[in-house]
Image (cartoon, rainbow, N blue to C red):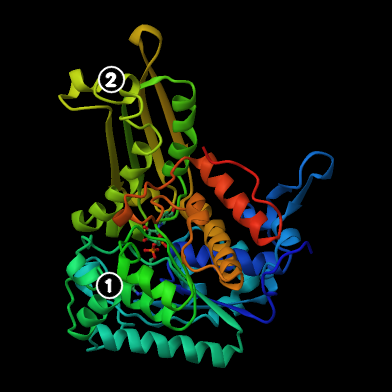
Amino acid sequence: MSNSTVKPASGKLGVLVVGLGAVTSTFMTGVLMARKGLSKPVGAMTQYDKIRVGRGADKKYLKYSEIVPMADLNDIVFGAWDVYPANAYQSAIYAEVLQEKDINPVKDELEQIVPMKAAFDKDYAKRLDGSNVMENKSRWEMTEQIREDIRNFKKEKGVERVVVLWAASTEVYVPIDMKYHGTLADLEAAMKADDKEHVAPSMCYAYAALSEGAPFIMGAPNTTVDIPAMWELSEKTHMPISGKDFKTGQTLVKSGFAPIIGTRCLGLNGWFSTNILGNRDGLVLDEPANFRTKEVSKLSTLESILVAEEQPDLYGANCGGAEKGGHQGYYHKVRINYYPPRNDSKEGWDNIDIFGWMGYPMQIKINFLCRDSILAAPLCLDLVLLSDLAARAGRHGIQRFLSFFLKSPMHDYTKNEVPVNHLFKQYTMLKNAIREMGGYEADEEID
Ligand SMILES: NC(=O)c1ccc[n+]([C@@H]2O[C@H](COP(=O)([O-])OP(=O)(O)OC[C@H]3O[C@@H](n4cnc5c(N)ncnc54)[C@H](O)[C@@H]3O)[C@@H](O)[C@H]2O)c1
């Protein structure tokens, strides 16, 4: 290994996932199958990607584990919380993402992953109705219980370190309110007062994880960690924090395709994105208050790549959208439609109205027939392993280098920081961080 000063990944790594649904069961099954050599972790950058280190005659391309000490797949021990009592095997069968032949070889291990009782509030996901929930607990008591769960898990499984990943349903939109979310003291006071309106259950998990010395990752679009109180806690406990919303299908395409338009200096009139999906995630998102959370997350991508103020002729006040839609700049719309027959096989359509030389209009259509959980599972693995790496490297607070994996990357909006959504700039941030942690020079510019 290079000159990395990162602490070694010794011992077992506990991966505690909030939500044992389609994404989580697909993630766990894939890791267990890969461990047995029965499947390949395709799509996981931590397992495949090679980064250049050194320059000129000294340059070489290395896998992440050759640059920094990464936890091995064999060292992972899984645990979970869920509203429903189904174990990971039952959940994988129920989700119908994977065929039984790809689940059965690890049936025994999956059956042992039995979810702990969820910190849940039906007002945050009205369409869910499970029995495996903590009863009559205030927000503060929920947090205490989760902390105890983490401590017990560590002891029982003999794990050295724990990472907590939220891959549970999208909660209703909780607007950021500085009165309750501004400082750690405000948030703690709201939790102790059992303020159900301003403290989402997801905040209890994040608070508990960080307090127990575990990095926390928000895989859904919840505003959970987008509050200064959580940043303060992550600084205080020296833990990495990241979010939000796995960048899997349509937004991955958007953040990779928009740079083509921007780099070529083509204009944009409008971008209409629509999806159909029929899994439980789609069911929860069918509720307008839950969809609002997703919509806010999905909409933010384009605006920071094709910036109206920087190119008014192409994306701002002077582009065609103003005449056609009576608004400034291009028209951006995102729709998610719950359509049960498709289950996890989401279909996304993007219609992109662009214009070129002398303003002549053209159209681009992208039709992505994807599989939601197949795309999300490798992101879970990458986020977990890289968050564990970051913790061992002594990185704390918002982990901007993980923006690559996230639809709506965390940023300090109180200081007017603009998030980086451009896929290739995000990749540069990721590579630079790994180089730096490996004791190499972070030698690529983000301009
Ligand atoms: N698959 C993708 O491409 C993708 C992309 C981005 C984000 N996400 C997000 O990932 C999350 C998981 O997606 P999924 O398809 O696995 O959904 P899912 O509905 O299959 O699983 C979510 C599970 O979370 C559980 N849950 C809900 N609230 C909980 C709580 N408070 N505590 C513990 N468990 C709780 C539910 O009971 C359910 O089993 C969703 O929020 C989704 O929006 C998925």
Residue 151: percent from the left, percent from the top? 48, 90
Q: Is mark 2 within 8 Å of ligand 1?
A: no
Residue 259: percent from the left, percent from the top? 47, 31
For marks 2 and 1 on the same chain, the one whose residue lies earlier in the sequence: 1
Residue 319 is marked as 2
Residue 438 seen in this snapshot:
yes
SS class, disc 1? loop
In the image, is 43 to the left or to the right of 367?
A: right
Residue 183 is marked as 1
Question: Residue most toward the top?
Answer: 358
Give the residue type at disc 1: Thr
Question: Residue most toward the right?
Answer: 57
For image coordinates 34% across by 82% down, the residue present is 132
Q: Nearer the viewer, residue 150 or 232?
A: 232
SS class, disc 2? loop
Give the residue type at disc 2: Cys
- 327 is higher (above) or lower (below) than 144: above
Mark 1 neighbour density, 10 Å: few (under 14) some (14–19) many (20 or more): some
